[in-house]
Image (spheres, rainbow, N blue to C red):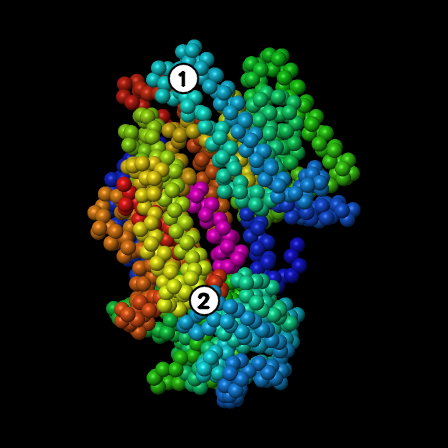
């Protein structure tokens, strides 16, 4: 990519650009397009790792790339707005039924959500996405992550609206783009089941019927997309180049994730084992979380998106922006959050330190990768703490809603809940 | 994790931190200052050692014989310089060619944003001349640079003479595995900037220069030589580069090792090393040396012509010959041998210098303090900000009794509107932007209306905006929100504290000295400012500890440490010229200190000022 090696500043600027987003940048797509125009497989080089549909999409819109990325972000924001609005309506209706049925303990009234506080939540979610510096960064750098976010947001919207076919199609599209959204299958299924009042019960045929139906729609559309890709390029190159690239992590360019440093240090013969361990990490939490949160699929979606963006192999700041957009939707958990101050300070400080340490390492040459990785590690620990804090708070609220807010010990003194 | 998840233990810890907050903060501040002062104490520092294998064990024999001839060349150069009234380009080209170098020239012009009164230049036009000695023994992929400035008046003629002498001598040797570039740059850093940008195909500051016709490989190391007398008493090593960046410590080690070997007196910050570290005067000598380095580094300006190389990942230092009244003199042949030895060792490098430290402070040339030792001093200051922020956070949460564990919390406090926080933040930053842009933009207008020169106009406008900022932004939230609430200033202070902590942390990582000096003055006011402290006294303290005043103190301390104390009047003039130099450094070389102070630190201080006058 860089013609002149003497041109150190240009070179570092190139890497600086990569720092911002690391993966899925537009100029890589341009490279793929150029190869395609020359009649070569776009995957012949070692740079392009986007899916064939992306390359054909940009084949038509490459001249309007800036607008496309802005539109994608706007689309994401609108989809999130509508989705959260609809979801809030559902939540409120459910709460009303529960209140009418007098299922909540009396001292829990202050936990009840009011329409007044819920009114601005959808707007906040959309604004949180659009005004998030991470989103802006991602959009300015023209990362395809913006498009993936739009697809996931549309998937959430369709799921919340209860359109199982569209939901399956968008989920398939998201999976096709980056594999990991596969784990969103479980929450989507749970939500749609809940919407149709089908209990999750292994003995019920209606449960199996719908599950099979949704699985079929999902796998079918995924199959169509993969075959379409094959017919577009008439080769299966893209499978190894896109999915192999995501799963086997050959590119160890520093990013904000956990993989690069670890695998740069790894002895070669342990590589396969640890890749499996790291990758399973993303998918592993799906089952326990789905069991624990089967009544709350939308929160489960949030958890899954967050886990994906933390543990995926090439995370970018755009991914973080997507799950952070959901934080205003859980405003009511605020009182149960324990480490929010610590976590937000760490996240803030790390976001500021990323460019500084990158500058010192790559540009000034005075610091080294260890400095940068230390911050990456801290950043991810903070993210994990954030997500687990929200998880704990959510469970805690549910616990109080069934057992009453002021827990008493057996001897009558005030009890506190301890998470161990 | 027990500490984070067990509510009882958390409560105990938070209680402890909030109850003992003020004493802990004071302790931290004192400990931070004490730690910093302790860094100059010899038992706490490490002895320097050569880390780079390629430069360590290899023996090099220095045989440079032609010191006298170099001086003669220097005199010839001086004569030609006088005749032409500037850089004698033709003569230099001819001389270099006759010494067997590939010679090229580069012309450049630069219009300064306003006249530089220290160096008396405005429209700069000049030529760089450089000759490349091609490496006979290796593919020409790497290069070393030796540069000498062609300065005004009678300065540095000997340096150019020695450079040409070395070129001739190096030409006859066969050891060279790297291209050696001999550069004579005009108009010191402006010429250097033009040459470096030309060499690397970049243009970061919008200068106008002709492209380079000849290139060597990628530059591995560079030395800049300044020599203005035939004999010298000592050599001074200058390390501080642009934005406080330092070259790899191995370069300093190399210089020190050769000075020891050849027997040349060597100094850093113009201070000789002393052996009596256990006496008070010995300690204070080391402390003075270190503080000079801290002040120079904090200024963020290149303190020699080498300063711009560092930006391109090239290890570089300036070597300055000093002629004082000491008896023992060193002649040019010896300096030539020293440089020959250093270049022979640099020639042996297999990769860029990277083994040794990049972050260090030097209390003497043979001792250094690495980042792991000096960072705690800053950390102790920064932790005060975080402790205060934690305290505020708990206070904000605690206004309804004990939301600590979520259970006992009553109604959420009506949070102060975002607007009431955002308004002071935005207005402070707007003032910062004004401070950054207006001085240069409005110089013409100022010159028309007031009897001042352009430079004075820029500096005085900067000071005027700085002072006006004090009157302008406070209590703006009242326009929108009516009365400021108790929560309002707490939230604002929380924001200001975190902002300052992140800002100082980032600054200290890039330029420790700057971060530390700013922390030293800003942390106390940030920690203890509230609207309830006595107004007049607090306001006076805040002004005295504001970034501008800190700069003024730094000027005086610097002069004091350099043993050239100045009167108040001269100090003020110096302060003005330091401001103009800071603005010029930013415009010419892209130094970041001025924008940092104007766009970030000053607004942050204004936020604190705002809190003091919160109503």
Q: Nearer the viewer, residue B389 or A146?
A: A146
Is A367 one of the magenta-colored residues? Answer: yes
In the image, the segment drawn in magenta is: A346-370
Total numbered labels placed on residues in the image? 2
Subunit of mark 1? A
Quadrant location of the N terminus of chain B in the rendered image:
top left
**Marks 1,2: beta carbons within 8 A:** no
Label 1 Cα crowd, 10 Å radius (few <14 / some 14-19 / many 20+): few
**Which residue ends up furthest to the top in the rendered image?**
A101
Task: Judge from the rendering whether residue B187 lies leftward or rightward of residue B415; answer left or right.
Answer: right
Which residue is painted at 75% across and 45% down in the image? Answer: A36
| Residue A403: % across, % down | 38, 17
Mark 1 and mark 2: Cα distance apart in space: 73 Å
Q: Which mark is residue B114?
A: 2
| Residue B165: % across, % down | 54, 84
Subunit of mark 2? B
Is B259 one of the magenta-colored residues? Answer: no
Which residue is painted at 28% across and 43% down in the image? Answer: B614
Helix, strand or loop: magenta stretch: helix
Label 2 Cα crowd, 10 Å radius (few <14 / some 14-19 / many 20+): many
Q: Nearer the viewer, residue B368 or B401?
A: B401
Which residue is painted at 63% across and 74% down in the image? Answer: B135
Residue under pointer 1: A402
- Discs 1 and 2 carry the same chain letter: no
The correct choice, above or below, for B414 with respect to A370 in the image is above
| Residue A38: % across, % down | 77, 48
């Amino acid at each position: 990519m860089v013609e002149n090696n003497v041109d150190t500043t240009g070179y570092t600027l190139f890497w600086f650009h990569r720092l911002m987003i690391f993966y899925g940048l537009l100029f890589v797509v341009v490279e793929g397009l150029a190869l395609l125009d020359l009649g070569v497989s776009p995957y012949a080089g070692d740079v392009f790792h986007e899916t064939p549909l992306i390359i054909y999409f940009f084949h038509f819109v490459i001249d309007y790339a800036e607008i496309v990325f802005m539109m994608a972000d706007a689309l994401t924001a609108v989809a999130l707005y509508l989705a959260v609005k609809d979801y809030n309506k559902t939540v409120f209706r459910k709460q009303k039924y529960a209140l009418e049925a007098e299922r909540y303990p009396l001292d829990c009234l202050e936990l009840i959500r009011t329409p007044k506080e819920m009114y601005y939540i959808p707007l906040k979610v959309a604004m949180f996405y659009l005004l998030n510096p991470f989103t802006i960064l991602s959009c300015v750098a023209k990362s395809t992550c913006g498009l993936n976010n739009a697809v996931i947001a549309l998937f959430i919207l369709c799921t919340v609206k209860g359109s199982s076919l569209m939901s399956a199609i968008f989920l398939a599209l998201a999976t096709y783009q980056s594999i990991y959204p596969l784990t969103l299958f479980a929450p989507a299924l749970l939500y749609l089941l809940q919407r149709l009042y089908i209990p999750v019960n292994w003995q019920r045929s209606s449960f199996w019927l719908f599950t099979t139906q949704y699985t079929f729609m999902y796998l079918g559309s995924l199959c169509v997309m993969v075959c379409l890709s094959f017919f577009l390029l008439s080769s299966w190159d893209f499978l190894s180049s896109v999915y192999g690239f995501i799963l086997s992590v050959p590119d160890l360019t520093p990013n904000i994730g956990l993989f690069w440093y670890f695998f740069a240090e790894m002895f070669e013969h342990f590589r396969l084992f640890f890749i499996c361990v790291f990758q399973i990490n993303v998918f592993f939490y799906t089952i326990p979380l789905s069991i624990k949160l089967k009544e709350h699929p939308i929160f489960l979606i949030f958890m899954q998106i967050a886990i994906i963006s933390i543990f995926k192999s090439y995370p970018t700041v755009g991914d973080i922006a997507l799950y952070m957009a959901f934080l205003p939707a859980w405003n009511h958990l605020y009182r149960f959050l324990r480490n929010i101050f610590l976590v937000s300070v760490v996240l803030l400080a790390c976001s500021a330190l990323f460019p500084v340490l990158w500058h010192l390492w790559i540009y000034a040459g005075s610091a080294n990768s260890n400095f940068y990785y230390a911050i990456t590690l801290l950043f991810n620990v903070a993210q994990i703490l954030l997500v687990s804090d929200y998880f704990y708070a959510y469970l805690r609220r549910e616990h109080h809603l069934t057992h009453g807010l002021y827990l008493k010990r057996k001897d009558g003194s005030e009890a506190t809940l301890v998470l161990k | 994790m027990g500490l984070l998840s067990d509510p009882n233990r958390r409560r105990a810890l938070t209680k402890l931190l909030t109850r003992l907050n003020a004493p802990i903060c004071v302790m931290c501040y004192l400990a931070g200052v004490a730690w910093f002062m302790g860094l100059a104490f010899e038992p706490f520092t490490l002895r320097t050692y050569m880390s780079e294998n390629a430069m360590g064990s290899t023996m090099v024999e220095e045989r440079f014989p032609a010191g006298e001839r170099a001086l003669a060349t220097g005199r010839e150069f001086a004569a030609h310089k006088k005749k032409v009234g500037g850089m004698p380009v033709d003569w230099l080209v001819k001389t270099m060619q006759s010494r067997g170098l590939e010679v090229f020239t580069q012309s450049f012009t630069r219009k300064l944003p306003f006249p530089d009164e220290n160096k008396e230049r405005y429209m700069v036009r000049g030529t760089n001349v450089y000759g490349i000695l091609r490496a006979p023994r290796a593919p020409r992929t790497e290069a070393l640079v030796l540069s000498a400035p062609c300065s005004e008046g009678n300065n540095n003629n000997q340096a150019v003479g020695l450079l040409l002498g070395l070129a001739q001598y190096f030409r006859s040797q066969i050891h060279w595995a790297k291209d050696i570039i001999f550069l004579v740059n005009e108009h010191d850093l402006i010429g250097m900037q033009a040459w470096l940008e030309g060499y690397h195909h970049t243009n970061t500051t919008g200068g106008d220069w002709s492209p380079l016709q000849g290139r060597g490989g990628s530059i591995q190391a560079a030395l800049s030589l300044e020599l203005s007398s035939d004999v010298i008493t000592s050599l001074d090593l200058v390390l501080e580069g642009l934005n406080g960046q330092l070259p790899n410590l191995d370069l300093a080690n190399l210089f020190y090792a050769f000075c020891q070997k050849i027997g040349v007196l060597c100094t850093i910050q113009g201070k000789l090393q002393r052996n009596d570290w256990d006496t008070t005067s010995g300690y204070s000598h080391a402390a003075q040396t270190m503080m000079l380095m801290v002040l120079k580094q904090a200024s963020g300006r290149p303190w020699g012509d080498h300063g711009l190389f560092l930006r391109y990942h090239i290890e570089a230092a300036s070597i300055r010959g000093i002629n004082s009244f000491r008896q023992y003199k060193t002649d040019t042949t010896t300096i030539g041998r020293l440089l020959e030895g250093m270049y022979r060792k640099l020639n042996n490098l297999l990769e860029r210098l990277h083994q040794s430290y990049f972050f260090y402070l030097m209390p003497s040339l043979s001792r250094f303090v690495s980042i792991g030792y000096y960072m705690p001093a800053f950390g102790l200051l920064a932790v005060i900000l975080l402790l205060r922020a934690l305290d505020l956070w708990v206070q904000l949460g605690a206004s309804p009794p004990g939301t600590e564990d979520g259970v006992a919390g009553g109604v959420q406090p009506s949070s102060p509107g975002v607007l009431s926080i955002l308004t002071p933040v935005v207005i402070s930053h707007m003032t910062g932007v004004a401070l950054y842009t207006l001085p240069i933009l409005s110089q013409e207008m100022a010159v028309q209306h007031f009897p001042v020169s352009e430079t004075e106009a820029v500096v005085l406008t900067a000071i005027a905006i700085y002072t006006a900022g004090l009157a302008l932004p406070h209590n703006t939230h009242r326009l929108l929100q009516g009365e400021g609430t108790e929560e309002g200033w707490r939230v604002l202070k929380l924001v200001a504290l975190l902002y300052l902590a992140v800002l100082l942390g980032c600054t200290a990582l890039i330029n420790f000295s700057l971060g530390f000096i700013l922390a030293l003055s800003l942390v106390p006011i940030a920690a203890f400012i509230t609207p309830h402290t006595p107004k007049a006294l607090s306001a006076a303290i805040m002004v005295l500890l504001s970034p501008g005043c800190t700069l003024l103190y730094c000027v005086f301390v610097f002069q004091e440490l350099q043993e050239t104390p100045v009167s108040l009047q001269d100090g003020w003039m110096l302060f003005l010229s330091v401001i103009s130099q800071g603005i010029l450094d930013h415009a010419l070389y892209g130094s970041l200190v001025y924008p940092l102070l104007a766009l970030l630190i000053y607004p942050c201080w204004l936020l604190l000022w705002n809190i003091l006058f919160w109503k």
